[in-house]
Amino acid sequence: MFPTKVKRLLQFRNTLWGCAHCSRLVLGIETSCDDTGAAVMDETGKILGESLHSQKEVHLRTGGIIPTVAQQLHRENIERVVQEALERSHVAPSRLSAVATTVKPGLSLSLGIGLDFSLRFVRQHNKPFIPIHHMEAHALTVRMHLPVPFPFLVLLVSGGHSLLAVARGVDDFLLLGHSLDEAPGDMMDKVARRLSLIKHPQCSTLSGGQALELLAKDGDRSRFPFRTPMGQTYDCCFSFAGLRNQVNMAIMKKEAEEGIEQGTLLSCVKDIAAATQHTVACHLAKRTHRAIMFCKENGMLPSSNPILVLSGGVASNEYIRKTLSIITETTGLHLLCPPAKFCTDNGVMIAWNGVERLREGKGILPPNVDVCYEPKALLGVDMSAEVRAAAIRLPSVRIKIHN
Ligand code: KG4
Ligand code: ZN
């Protein structure tokens, strides 16, 4: 008979390599911001069971994410969400090959709940642990449905991030640009709050970005000609704080003109929404256009069928997708976006990242390992200085989209 320690080691090796006939199964867990998500997936990318608890409505009522509130809601829901994903998949913990969990970047208090839960889980069930970078997961989600080969260019836009990177492998990214201040989703959430869109009958349950997209459909963007940020900076970084300031100034001016208090719906909300959405889209498009030109000049993308992947919560915006498609058509790239459901945070994308890493044997840790979360973490190797030094000037492209 083997001593217990050897038996546990053999069990660990079996779960890692699996048997020849059964697909390996991964449990993915996400708690980096305001969604508690879990999913069980097999090695082919088939979702066997999933569960998602969104905190959106609570944060809408409190006027933004309060980290201690997000932490408490994750704490109250994580066990149930994981249990639900396992039950729906009819998979017992003993059959899992690994547990993959977001450990960076994100809100410390939120990341901590998912990580503590996962470490207890992997120790209890003696399973390998795969720490996940949240933005890596957003970048790879598209490969769950389509066999997109590396390398490809990726634009990730969410409530916490905006970045452009070349994905060269599952854990191999070159970062071309990132946000210098706030993220586009965060900025749109703040504008929506400033406009009190929660009081708008059509928008009371929508995130800021969703609310602006809906209202913009009937708005006239030309009534508020906001300046596209960073016009004189020839790199691929982003800035949204200045644009938010421009929008706030316009709102204040209109409130004064209409003689109404802050907190009352303006008559021109639709026009402000349309102009804000358009300027966000143009800023993303221009930085992406420069990234494409940089990649072409440096042979960083394949010459045949080069691909731009657009993902993250803000990527569910149709107007932004259409704007980016004008850039890809102009430059000869092919634009791919995961379905909107998988652009926003969920456990499935974390499980898929776990599958990708398990297949390649990358970053798989034993159950007793100590892992810390990291609230801030760049994705890949930072090349933004090289991009800035290249100072690429853009040809003008006409962005005209009909609602
Ligand atoms: O990726 P995600 O679910 O969470 C983060 O990792 O941040 O993205 C959430 C963000 C929110 O800021 C939300 O306003 C934005 O994505 N968002 C949208 C749309 N749907 C969600 N922004 C613009 N248009 C949308 N349709
Ligand atoms: Zn996200």
Image: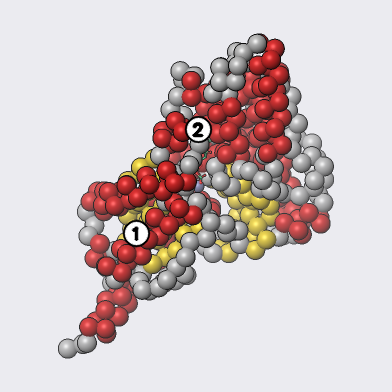
Of marks 1 and 2, which one's residue comes earlier in the chain? 2
In the image, residue 162 sits, relative to residue 100, either above or below, namely: above
Quadrant, the C terminus: top right
Q: Position of residue 14 (x, y in %)?
A: 29, 75
The quadrant in which residue 229 appears is: top right
Q: Residue furthest left?
A: 1
The quadrant in which residue 94 appears is: bottom left
| Viewer-closest of 253 and 357 | 253
The quadrant in which residue 183 appears is: top right
Disc 1: which residue: 117
Q: Position of residue 235 (x, y in %)?
A: 76, 49
Residue drawn at point x = 67 percent, y = 27 percent: 248
Label placed on residue 63: 2
Q: Which element type, helix, strand or loop, lies under badge 2?
A: loop
Q: Does the closest atom of ligand 1 sit within 8 Å of the Cβ of label 2?
A: no
C-alpha span from label 1 to label 2: 28 Å
Label placed on residue 385: none
Q: Amino acid at mark 2?
A: Gly
Quadrant, the N terminus: bottom left
In the image, residue 334 sits, relative to residue 207, either above or below, namely: below
Q: Which element type, helix, strand or loop, lies under badge 1?
A: helix
Taking the image as drawn, is residue 66 in sight? yes
Question: Callout 2 environment at 10 Å: few (<14), some (14 to 19), or many (20+)?
Answer: some
Please indicate whether residue 252 sits to the left or right of residue 196 in the image: right
Q: Amino acid at mark 1?
A: Phe
Please indicate whether residue 201 sits to the left or right of residue 334 in the image: left
